[in-house]
Image: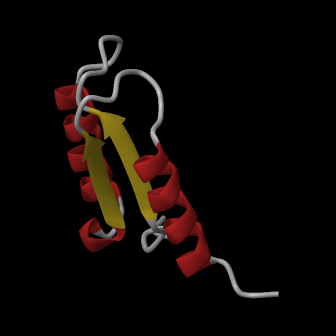
Amino acid sequence: NGVNKDIAILQCHGEMDPMIPVRFGALTAEKLKSVVTPAKVQFKTYPGVMHSSCPQEMMAVKEFIEKLLPRI
């Protein structure tokens, strides 16, 4: 019904993920862009990262959250 059409989405993916290939992550991001406002979807990949996280990804998550949440 379009209620959440403008929701911001950050999707991160390790380029060496053996469990979920990065191309499936990219396909998911493209599908999301067909459901919500495309400019609100960010898809970030991280070279050498497997099915885990890395400091750069955690920094991206932190920055994403800080942009969206009001300061208290």
Instruction: Give the quarter of the figure containing the C terminus.
Output: bottom right
| Residue lying furthest right | 72
Residue displayed at 33% across by 29% down: 49
Q: Report the front residue among 27 and 17.
A: 17
Residue displayed at 26% across by 72% down: 39
Q: Quadrant of residue 36?
A: bottom left
Which percent across, then down, holds residue 43? 29, 52
Q: Quadrant of residue 71?
A: bottom right
| Residue lying furthest top | 18
Q: Horizontally, is 13 left or right of 30 in the view?
A: right
Which percent across, then down, holds residue 23? 17, 29
| Residue lying furthest bottom | 71
Its colouring scheme is secondary structure
Q: Report the front residue among 29 and 20.
A: 20
Residue displayed at 50% across by 68% down: 64
The image shows residue 52, relative to residue 40, as above or below, that is above
Q: Report the front residue among 22 and 53.
A: 53
Number of disc labels: 0
Which percent across, then down, holds residue 69? 66, 78
Q: Quadrant of residue 65?
A: bottom right
Which percent across, then down, holds residue 12? 38, 44
Q: Report the front residue among 2 and 16.
A: 16
Residue displayed at 44% across by 74% down: 6
The image shows residue 54, relative to residue 60, as above or below, that is above
